[in-house]
Amino acid sequence: MLFIKNYILLTWLVLFPFFLRAQNKTATDTTKLKEVVVVSSRFEESKENVAQAVQVITGARLKQLNSISTADVLQQTPGVSVQKSQLGGGSPVIRGFEANRILLVVDGVRMNNAIYRGGHLQNSITVDNNSLEKIEVGFGSSSVFYGSDALGGVVQFFTKKPVLNTTSGSALARFSTAANEYTSSINFNFGREKWAATTVVTYSKIGDLRQGANNYQPGTEKWKSIYFVEQSNGADLVRTNSRPEVQTQTGYNQMDLLQKFLYRNNDRVTQVLNFQYSNSGDIPRYDRLAQLENNQPRYAEWYYGPQKRFSGSYQLQLNNFKKLFNHSNITIAYQNLVESRHDRRLNSSNLNNRSEEVGIFSLNADFNKTFKKNDLGYGIELNQNYVQSRANRLNISTGTITNLDTRYPDGGSDVFSAAAFVSHRFKINKKWQITEGLRLNHVNLYAKFNDKRFFPFDFNSVNQANIALNGNASIIYKPKNDFKISLLGSSGFRAPNVDDLAKVFESTAGSVILPNPDLKPEYTYNAELGFEKNFKENATITLNGFYTWYRNAITTQPFLFNGQSEIFYDGELSIVTANVNAQKAYLTGFSADLTFNPLRNIIVKSNAAYTFARITSLSPQQPLDHIPPFMGLSSIEYAFKNFQGEFFVQYNQRKKLKDYNLNGEDNLPQATPNGMPAWYTVNVRAGLDLNKNFRIQTALENILDRNYRVFASGISAPGRNFIVSLRGSF
C-alpha cells in the first residue's frame, strides 16, 4: 500500500502545478469519446458507443515509442504487463490473464492456435510494429465477437493499408545501446486509381542484453550472468563472464515482411490480398541457460529454433447492400507456423530436438446492419488447426540420431471450431443505449498417440467436443456529451487446446507436465463498471472496475501417473503435474487513466492498474498465477512546431511471495526471498523534424540504470539504454 500511496502522491505532485496554471489557458481537446475502434464489434464504431475498456496505440504513437518489438510496445501500454523468459519474447498479461487466455488478432485473423500454451508466449514479436497502422487492446472477456481464448481481452493488430492514387515511401534506421541493436525498415506504397500495393520489410540484429548496474537488492545478485558455456574441440567449457551485467546468450536476429494488395472495384466492393512473413534466427532461452546446478550451468544449450510465421489472406469488403447489410467483411486465411526447441545438458553429447508445425485454415464472415435506432451485427467463424509434432535426439559426437518423446502427440492433432454470433445495439435516446449479444461455439479436438514407449498411457487418443453459449449485455448512460457511465456484463469461454490436453514437458527443473484427457473447458463471468469524464475540454479521467468469476479454471497442480507422484523424466526424478480444472477462482481490480492539457503544447498523462485473484476451491485459498502487481506510468509530453519530447516514469509494485502460485507459471525461482522487488524507471525521448523528409529520434531509457525484472520474467530488463534513429520519407 505504501507504494500505491507514493505513486498517487508523485502523480499529483506532477499534475498540481499544471492545474493551477491552466485555469485561463486555451487547451487542446483531449476527449477520446469520439475515437474510432474496431476491437469491440469487428467494425469501426465510435468509442462513445463502447462499454468495454479499450486502449488505442495509434500509428503516430508507435513511431514515438520507437520500440524494438511489438512486445515492448505493449509493455508501455496502460493496463498491460509483459513477461519475458528471453530477450526474443514477450507475453502480454491483461487483467490477470496471459498466453492462451489472451487473443491476438492480425487484420481480423486470429493468431492463437492449437498449441498456444498456458504459460508464457513469444508470438507477439512475430508481428512487426513497423508494419502497423495501429493497435487496439480490449480489456475483459470478448468471447461474443472472438470466441474461445478471449477470456482476459483481445490485442488487435492492424497493418498498414495500401493507399490509392499515392506513391510514397519511408525508411527507418535505428541503433540502441543496451543490446547493441540495429534495425532497418523500409516501407513503400504504390497506388493508382483502382489498385494499390504496400510493402514493408524490416530486419533487426539484436545482441546480448545488458541489465542495469544499480539497485541490486538482497536476492537479486543471482540475476547477474556469472557463467556461460563455450564449445571447444567437442568439449563444453564453462567460462566466467567478465561483464556479469551483460546477459550472455540472449541475442538474436529477425526479418519481417508485409505485402498487401488492394483493388477497389467501386464504392461498394473492395478486395485485399494480405501476405505476412516473419522469421527469426535461433532465440536462446535465457532463463534456462542461467539455471545453475552444483554451481555450474545446468544446460550447455537451450534455444528456440527459427520461429516462422506465414499468413496469407483474402478479404472481400462490401458496403451499402442496404437490404441485407451496410458493411461486410469476409476473410479467408491460411497460416503456417513452425517452431522448435533444442536443449543439451552440460557435458552431455545428446542434443534434444523437438519441433512443431501448425497449419490453420479460417473463414470469417462479419455483417453489420443499421436501421432507425438499431445497429445489428452478425457473423460466422470457421477454424481448422492441424498440428504435427516431431522429436529426435542427436549425439553431437557421433552424429547418431535416436527417437525422443514428442512434446505433443506424435500421431498428429487437429482442432476444428465453428461459431455464429449476433449482437444488437439500441439507442433509446441521446442519453441511453443498450447492447446485447450471443455467440454459439462448437470446438472439437482429436489427438493420437502412436509411440507410447516413453509414456505408456492407458489411452491411445484424446477426443473432445465442447459446445458453449456466450453472451454480453451493457448499458451506457451519457447525461452530458462529456460524461459516460457504462455497466457491462459478459461471459467468456475457452476450450482446452492441444497444449492443455496432450503436452509432455518439463515446466521447471524437477517437474514434468503430463496429459490429462479429463480436462474440461473453462468459463468466466464478468461484471464491469466504467466512468469517463471530460473537464472543460482539457482533461479526461477514466475509471474502470471489474470482477470476474472464473469457473473450471485450468491450473497446473500435482498429479498422479500410474499411481505415482514422481517419475523419471529426461534422466531426472521429477514431480508429476498436470493441467486440471481448479473449479473456482475470482479476479478483481481497477484501472485509472488521466489525460490533461494544462497548456496548448503540453499533455500530462498518468495511469494505474491493479488486479487481485484467488483460487477459492482450494483450502486454504491459493493465489491464481499470472497476476501482475500494481503498475502505473506517468508522463509529460511537449510538442512545438517540429519538435516533440516526452518525460515518463514507469512503476511496478513489489510482488510478495504469499501472492505467488507455487505450481503455476509465476516462475518462483526467479524471485528473491522477499518476492519480486518493486521498481521504477526514469526515461526521456524526443523527436525533431530536420526537414519535411527527415526526422531524428533519440531516447534515454532507464536513466538511473536500475536493475529490475518484470514479474515472472526470467531475464532482467534493459539497463540504461540510449536509442537513436533516423526516419526518412519520400
Image (tube, rainbow, N blue to C red):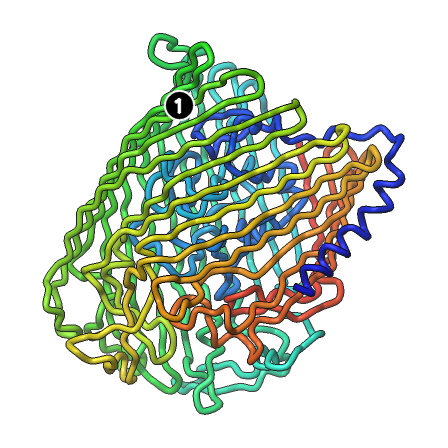
The image shows a total of numbered marks equal to: 1
Residue 15, position in %: x, y?
Answer: 80, 47
Q: Would residue 456 be found to the left or right of residue 237 on screen?
A: left
Eyeballing the image, is 298 above or below 67?
Answer: below
Quadrant in the picture for residue 20? top right
Q: Tell me if I can see residue 548 in this picture.
A: yes
The residue sitting at 71% across, 65% down in the picture is 720
The residue sitting at 39% across, 20% down in the picture is 376
Q: Tell me if I can see residue 265 in this picture.
A: no
Residue 536, position in %: x, y?
Answer: 77, 28
The residue sitting at 53% across, 86% down in the picture is 239
Eyeballing the image, is 114 above or below 430?
Answer: below
Residue 527, position in %: x, y?
Answer: 46, 42
Q: Residues within 10 Å of mark 1 (few under 14, many from 20)?
A: some
- Comparing 245 with 487, the one in front is 487
Read off the residue under disc 1: 424
Q: Would residue 206 be found to the left or right of residue 492 on screen?
A: right
Eyeballing the image, is 377 above or below 712?
Answer: above
- Comparing 447 with 500, the one in front is 500
- Tag 1, which secondary structure? strand
Residue 460, position in %: x, y?
Answer: 10, 62
What's the amino acid at mark 1? His
Q: Would residue 46 be found to the left or right of residue 272 on screen?
A: right
Q: Would residue 217 be found to the left or right of residue 450 on screen?
A: right
The residue sitting at the front extreme is 619
Quadrant in the picture for residue 288? bottom left
Quadrant of the rendering where the C terminus is positioned: top right
Eyeballing the image, is 118 above or below 186?
Answer: below
